[in-house]
Amino acid sequence: MHIEVVTLFPALVATASRVGVTGRAVERGQVTVGTVNPRDYAQDVHGTVDDRPYGGGPGMVMKIEPCRTAIRAAKAKLPEGSPSIYLAADGVPFTQAKAAELAKVPGMLLLAGRYEGVDERLLEMEISDRISIGDYVLSGGELPALVLIDAVLRLLPGVLGDAESAAQDSFSAGLLDWPHYTRPEGFEGHAVPPVLLGGDHAAIRRWRLKQALGRTWTLRPELLESRDLSAEERRLLDEYKADLGNTQGSSR
Ligand code: SAM
């Protein structure tokens, strides 16, 4: 996959792309993460990329000409069929399903805004999608772009050491993840659930599914509303609720 980020802060994107899962994918040649800086296409000697908003008011707006030339330069490097995405607080919420969808494209252009954002005409002319990473406002689109890159790359075949690991993550099956434990078996009086130590794989699968269902029901009940539960899942969730009732009863 080839990703080009149009940003006024290329160092931020380049630094983050050198570490962790993204860094390894870049090193192995599974992905290319490039940057294009609109400042390199500014039309004056001061490198001006922003200007005051028409209609007045606070803040500055990213100018159309340098951004457009930068976007065109980025697009020229990308394969056919690459979407052009503007990271925006007023975009469509980013989800695991959207990450899975983007994991199938050959490349993508990510436009990171700064100031009050970019001239709207640029978005109309050059952008295919607007994506938000949450209902809050950040100072720039670089961190959202990196969030999107991280979430998408871990879904590419061969990027994670164990492909199962992404398939089992929260949201992949419409549920939150189950709890994880590693050695030591006991720590300051806190034990690992015994079922995980017994080697009974069917029992472990049932326990994990039950925990995933229970956690989703407790922490994100709306996820269950949009998901049909199988008969086994319904039974396990009932068991989870009953266990919870018993625990609360016994601690009174
Ligand atoms: N005036 C904009 C608004 O109220 O929606 C906020 C602009 S923000 C200060 C500057 C840039 O940060 C935006 O152009 C966008 O690229 C990025 N940004 C801020 N919050 C974001 C979010 N939740 N998701 C994605 N991008 C965001």
Image (spheres, rainbow, N blue to C red):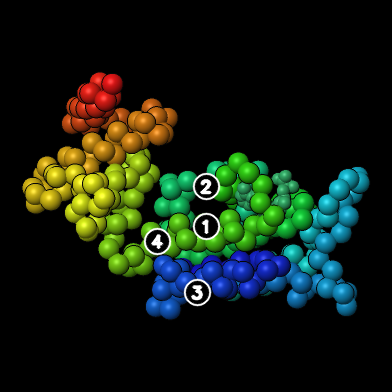
Q: Residues within 10 Å of mark 2 (few under 14, many from 20)?
A: some
Looking at the image, the residue that sits furthest to the front is: 188
Q: Amino acid at mark 1?
A: Val
Which comes before the other along the chain, label 1 or label 4? 1
Q: Nearer the viewer, residue 78 or 103?
A: 103
The x and y percentages for residue 206 are 17, 39
Q: Is residue 116 above or below residue 239?
A: below
Disc 3 versus disc 2: distance between alpha carbons?
Answer: 23 Å
Q: Quadrant of residue 143?
A: bottom right
Q: Is residue 89 above or below residue 165?
A: above
Q: Quadrant of the C terminus?
A: top left
User: Quick check: 34 left or right of 9?
Assistant: left
Q: Position of residue 85 (x, y in %)?
A: 60, 56
Residue drawn at the location 45% of the way across and 52% of the way down: 99
**Disc 3 residue: CB within 8 Å of ligand 1:** no
**Disc 1 and disc 4: Cα gap in Å?**
11 Å
Residues tagged 1 and 2 counted as in contact (Cβ below 8 A): yes
Q: Mark 4 or 2 closer to N-term?
A: 2
Secondary structure under the numbered disc 3 in the rendered image:
loop
Quickly name the residue at label 3. Answer: 18
